[in-house]
Amino acid sequence: MKLSPDAIRTLLTSVFPSEFIDDCARECGVVERDRDMDIRMLVWTLAVGFAVGGETRSIADYRRAYNAATNQSIAPSSFYARFTENLHNLLTELLEHALDEVAVPHHVSPAFDRFKDVIAADATIFRLQQHLSEFEASHDDASGVMLYLVHNVTEQSVISGEITDETTHESTLFETGSWLRGRLFLLDLGFFKYRRFALIDENDGLFVSRLKESANPLITAAPRTLRGNSIDIEGSQVFDIVGDLHRQYIDVDVVVEFDRREYDDQQSTDTKQFRVVGVLNPDTDEHHLYMTNLPREEFSASQIATLYRARWEVELLFRELKSRYALEEFDTSKEHIVKIQITAALLTLVVSRAILRVLADHAEERGEDVSFPTERWATTFRSYAQLILMELADLYGFPPPNIPELLYQEAKQPSPGRNTLLEEVCRDLTASAA
């Protein structure tokens, strides 16, 4: 049983129906449609055509992708004029809509089914080639954009994202509240904060974090299931005694003290009890230590360390953006174009994951045990992105591209008075001979 040729474009147009794009465009003040450009195809060019191109990512790349798909020859100035703050607002609205629509079925250990979602939050920095005051960097005369993502590990989708400057600390963007309920959060040391852990716990969420050495919590109990205690560790601080423990696993209860949020100019302190587990690294003879509120009766120290490894998925996501979609450096002097580029990249992720969902569902229907590594998938998607864009153009009634005419219009010198090097040499030779 083969996939239907219409499966992908049917899926994509259900994620972003034409009427929905048009309505959002009107609400955001973007020109809905004119005789030069179709806003629906402009959106799809940014969402799919972002993957098309070489090692750079520029508005010229988008324009060529749009022209090739629609059999048009939009002038550079006309195309560039569409890249406004209103266009960024439109893309942001479409992204927020799509984040709730796309998820890839996961086929992982049943242990993940214990949680509503498994979440990894993290951020990455993109350098700007030009200095933009809106994106301050950590050092002078530079600019840096930080992209913060909340990534659903098991469904391979992005829950939310935020674009800010490099000086913003990613941990300040982590929101607490009722949405934490039932979710497991895998956090690196940049998010290590006792009050944050307490809020996750109090909102019925779960977490695993690497243990920060400067924290050094107090051990209150060591379960009897741990054998081989050669020293009394209760009442000691973790890092004071961990070097003297040579067992493969450590699993202890600890108490932490932290400041509550200030209220009516009053600052109060509180305490919480969590677990600290450790797994011995045989290569270094040192323990990897984690703090968590996962129950001991359900998750062993070994399982907690294994779960934490899934946090690397968000690092792979950032690597996909940078290495597969060339989202690394921006050569622009406009803040909103930087944001358009990053939002388009996130839309590309959503669209590619939507297509991946079709493939995963198809494999399940055929009873095949098939996996789709994310970086391999990104490479495949990028290779076929222009064909997908042309499929969508066909759906909207655009004619097949006149390739010779497109090549002619794109390759010719845009400034009639400018000569090539050989033409200049010939001109100068003629002038000198006279």
Image (cartoon, grey):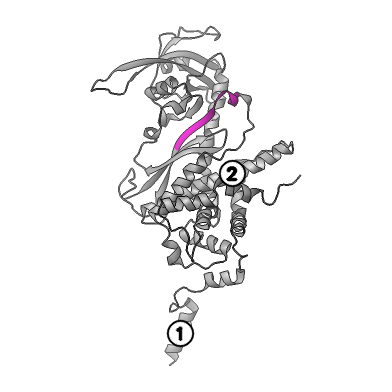
Check disc 1 and report the residue beneath it: 427
Which dot, 1 or 2, sits closer to the camera?
2
Residue 382 position, x and y percent, is 58, 52
For label 2, the crowd category at 10 Å Cα-Cα, with few meaning under 14, some 14 to 19 and many 20 or more, is many
Vertical position of residue 366 compared to residue 180: above or below = below
Magenta-span inclusion, residue 200: no
Instruction: Specify the segment rendered in magenta.
Output: 111-122
- The answer to whether 83 appears left or right of 266 in the picture is right
Q: Which residue corresponds to the image point at 46% horizontal and 59% vertical from the top-left?
A: 59
Q: Quarter of the image containing the C terminus?
A: bottom left
Magenta-span inclusion, residue 115: yes
- Name the element at disc 2: helix
Amino acid at dot 2: Ala
Numbered badge on residue 135? none
- Name the element at disc 1: helix
Mark toward the start of the polypeptide (1 vs 2): 2
